[in-house]
Amino acid sequence: MRLLQFLFRASPATLLLVLCLHLGANKAQENTRRIIIQNFEIPTTANRDEEVTAVLQVKTELKECMVAKVYLTSDVPVEGAFNYKYTRCLCDDYPNTYYWDFHTNRTVQIAAVVDIIRELGICPNDAAVTPIKNRFYTIKTLVVA
């Protein structure tokens, strides 16, 4: 009986070790880096035939660079610079900012889309990663009066 009590009795050092391991595992799960951080800005309202500027800032918390293809899409057709697509290297120390100037006569929902793609010749030395989740978007509505 004494032998069983000895085997099941935990020493203070063992309890401290288990507590530290448990806290360390929780801390490691919370320390995840965000792949893409988007800040999409457009006016909420505009007049007919008024030029509207959409601004999208894209950054990452990953240490590795990525090739990002960035574009706008909408629920109704919009002409002009709205359809421009940009492809650039995105690294954690240098966020990218994109601008689109366009006109519209109707209320429109606009999505700013960032696709992480595999393409050579964009990032230095072609050193870029492609995460499993590779499409990110933000949707805003522009009301035309």
Image (cartoon, helix red, strand yellow):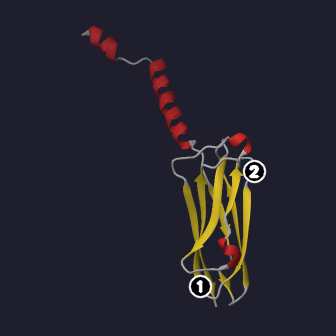
Amino acid type assigned to the residue bearing label 2 in the image: Tyr
Identified at 69% across, 78% down, the residue is 80
Residue 127 image label: none
Q: Classify mark 2: helix, strand or loop.
A: loop
Q: Is residue 123 above or below residue 52?
A: above
Amino acid type assigned to the residue bearing label 1 in the image: Thr
Identified at 46% across, 26% down, the residue is 18
- Asked whether, in this view, residue 141 is left or right of residue 98, the answer is left
Determine which quarter of the picture holds residue 10: top left
Label 2 – label 1 distance at C-alpha: 34 Å
Which quadrant is home to the N terminus?
top left
Determine which quarter of the picture holds residue 128: top right
Percent position (x, y) of residue 93? Answer: 74, 47
- Name the residue beneath numbered marker 1: 107
Identified at 67% across, 45% down, the residue is 65
| In-front residue for pair 125/29 | 125
- Name the residue beneath numbered marker 2: 94
| In-front residue for pair 106/123 | 123
Identified at 51% across, 28% down, the residue is 20
